[in-house]
C-alpha cells in the first residue's frame, strides 16, 4: 500500500455515518472521530496539504466550523496563515456576505475585511462537499475581493448531491467519496 493509501485507510477506518441527523433522511458523515485521533488528524492533514504545493498557494481559507479545524492544521503544515470564512454575525468587520442553501437548510457566510488582497492564491478547506452551496459561496466571497481560488480541498465528497458541478472549473481535491 502507498503512503497516501495507508493514510486514506486510517481516515476510512475512523469516520462514521450517523443516520437522521440533523433531520430525518439525512445520513450525516461525522469526522470528529477522525480528528480526535492523532493518526487520523495527521493522515488527514497530510493528504489535504498535498492538494497545494507550497509555491502555488499564499493562504488557507477555512470554512466554518469544521473547516477551521482542518484548515488550521493544513495551514500549519504548509507554513501559511489561515483566513476564516464565518457564519453570519460572528465577524466584527465584514468585507462581503453570501447566502446559500445546503443539504439540510440555508445559511450565510461572511469574509473578514483586510485579509485577502487582489491576486492572493487561496486554498479553501472544509470537511464535506455535499450540494456545494457552502463551497460555492466561499469561493465567490474569495473571488469577490480579487483573490484566486487555487483549489478546494475536502475530506469527503457526496457525489450524489453534485456539489462538484457548482464549483465550475475550480480544482477540487476530495480525499474520499460516499
Ligand atoms: O455542500 P453543502 O451542501 O453546502 O454542505 C457542506 C457543508 O455542510 C457542513 O457544514 P454546516 O453548514 O453543517 O456547518 P458547521 O460546519 O458549522 O456544522 C459541512 O461542514 C460543509 O461546510
Ligand atoms: N451528509 C452530510 N454529512 C456531513 N456534513 C454534511 N454537510 C452537508 N451534508 C452533510
Image: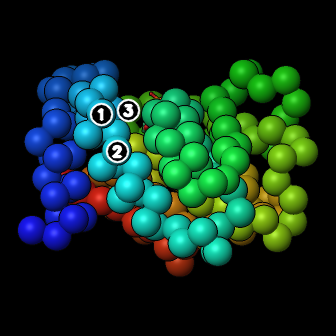
Per the image, label 1 sits on a secondary structure element best described as helix
**Residue 4 or residue 160, whichever sits in front:** 4
Judged by depth in the image, the label closer to the viewer, 1 or 3, is 1
Is the residue at mark 3 in contact range of ligand 2, meaning its CB lies under 8 Å from it?
yes
Q: Determine which residue is flagged by label 1.
A: 38
Image spot of residue 10 (x, y percent)? 17, 47
**Residue 25 or residue 49, whichever sits in front:** 49
Chosen colour scheme: rainbow
Q: From this viewpoint, is residue 171 visible?
A: yes
Pointer 1 with pointer 2, Cβ within 8 A? yes
Pointer 2 with pointer 3, Cβ within 8 A? no
Image position of 63 with respect to 52: above or below: above
Q: Residues within 10 Å of mark 2 (few under 14, many from 20)?
A: some
Pointer 1 with pointer 3, Cβ within 8 A? no
Per the image, label 2 sits on a secondary structure element best described as helix
- Residue 86 horizontal side relative to residue 124, left or right: right
Q: Which residue appears at 38% of the width and 55% of the height?
A: 46
**C-alpha distance separating marks 1 and 3:** 30 Å
Q: Which residue appears at 46% of the width and 59% of the height?
A: 49
Q: Earlier in the sequence, mark 2 or mark 3?
A: 2
**C-alpha distance separating marks 2 and 3:** 30 Å
Q: Determine which residue is flagged by label 3.
A: 104
Amino acid at each position: 500500500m502507498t503512503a497516501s493509501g495507508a493514510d486514506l485507510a486510517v481516515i476510512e477506518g475512523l469516520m462514521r455515518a450517523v443516520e437522521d441527523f440533523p433531520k430525518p433522511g439525512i445520513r450525516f458523515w461525522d469526522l470528529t472521530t477522525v480528528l480526535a485521533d492523532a493518526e487520523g488528524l495527521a493522515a488527514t492533514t497530510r493528504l489535504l496539504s498535498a492538494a497545494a504545493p507550497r509555491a502555488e498557494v499564499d493562504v488557507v481559507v477555512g470554512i466554518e466550523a469544521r473547516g477551521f479545524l482542518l484548515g488550521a492544521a493544513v495551514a500549519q503544515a504548509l507554513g501559511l496563515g489561515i483566513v476564516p470564512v464565518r457564519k453570519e454575525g460572528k465577524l466584527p468587520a465584514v468585507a462581503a456576505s453570501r447566502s446559500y442553501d445546503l443539504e439540510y437548510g440555508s445559511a450565510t457566510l461572511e469574509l473578514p475585511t483586510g485579509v485577502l488582497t487582489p491576486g492572493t492564491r487561496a486554498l479553501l478547506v472544509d470537511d464535506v462537499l455535499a450540494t456545494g452551496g457552502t463551497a460555492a459561496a466561499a469561493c465567490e466571497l474569495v473571488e469577490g475581493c480579487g483573490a484566486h481560488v487555487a483549489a478546494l480541498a475536502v475530506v469527503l465528497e457526496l457525489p450524489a448531491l453534485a456539489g462538484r458541478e457548482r464549483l465550475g472549473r475550480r480544482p477540487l481535491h476530495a480525499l474520499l467519496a460516499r
